[in-house]
Image: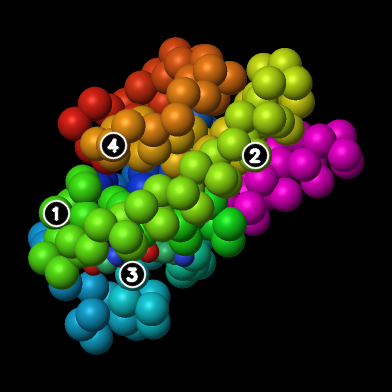
Amino acid sequence: MVRVLGRVTSINVRKVLWALEELDESYDREDWGLPIRDPKVPEFLALNPNGQVPAFIDDDGLVLWESNAVLLYLAKSRSALMPVDNHAHARALQWLIWQATELNPPWGYALNALARKTPGYDDPAKIAESIARWTDRMEILEAELAKGNTFIAGDSFSLADIVLGLSIHRWLRTPFEGKPLPAVEAYYARLRQRPAGARWMPDDIV
Ligand SMILES: N[C@@H](CCC(=O)N[C@@H](CS)C(=O)NCC(=O)O)C(=O)O
C-alpha cells in the first residue's frame, strides 16, 4: 500500500492526501513532522534528505519527496488529475509551479506570527510586508479566476486546483483582515463541495 509520512497540519502533506482521495486510492499515513515527530533523524532523512514532510512511498517501492512532484507522479502513473489537452495541461503545470515558487514564500512570516504564534515572529513591519506580498500574489489569482473558468486550468478539475485550494484555505484561515477576493472565494467554495476538498480544508486547520 502507498505510504505518506507527514502530519495533517502540513499543507504539503494535505495536497498528497487530497490527491490520493480523488484517485480513490487507499494509503497508510504516519505522523511525522514537528512538533509531533522530528523528521531530522536518520530513519526519515533516508527517505527525504531535506528532513521535511511529506515523504511518499508508492506500493512499487518508489520513494519521492517534494509535494508537487509527488502530485505529478501520481497523475502520470494513475492517468488522472491532469488535463489531456496540451494547453490546459501547460496551464495546470504553470499554476502548480507558481504555487510553490511565487505564492508560497510570501505567507511564511504572517503565518508564523498570526496563526502559529511562533516565538520570534512579532515584528509588525515584517508582518505587514508579508501580508502585502501575499495579497499581491492573491490578486493575480483573483484576476485569473474572475475570467470565469470553473477550475484554474479550464473546465476540468486538476492537481493545480488542489494546491491552490489549500493555499486559499490558508489565506482565509489566517487571522488578519485580508482584502476581499470574490472570485477566489467562489472558487474555494466550489472546491470545498468536493468530498476530498471538504475533508482536507477543514475549519480547524490553517
Ligand atoms: N517544498 C517542500 C516543502 C516541504 C515543507 O516545507 N514541509 C514543512 C511542512 S509544510 C515541514 O516539513 N516542516 C518541518 C516539520 O514539519 O518538521 C514540499 O513541497 O514538499
For the residues labelled 2 and 3, the Cα–Cα distance comes to: 28 Å
Q: Earlier in the sequence, mark 3 or mark 1?
A: 3
The residue wearing badge 1 is 117
Q: Which residue is mark 4?
A: 176
Which residue is found at the position 45% from the left and 35% from the top? 168
Few, some or many residues within 10 Å of mark 2 (<14, 14–19, 20+): few
Disc 2, SS: helix
* Residue at image mark 2: 140
Looking at the rendered structure, the kind of residue marked 2 is Ile
Mark 3 sits near ligand 1, with its Cβ under 8 Å away: yes
Q: Position of residue 139 (x, y in %)?
A: 59, 36
Q: Looking at the image, is mark 4 or mark 2 earlier in the sequence?
A: 2
Q: Earlier in the sequence, mark 3 or mark 4?
A: 3
Image marks 1 and 2: residues in contact by CB distance under 8 Å: no
Q: Is residue 91 visible?
A: yes
Task: Tell me which amino acid carries mark 3.
Answer: Gln
Magenta highlight range: 72-99
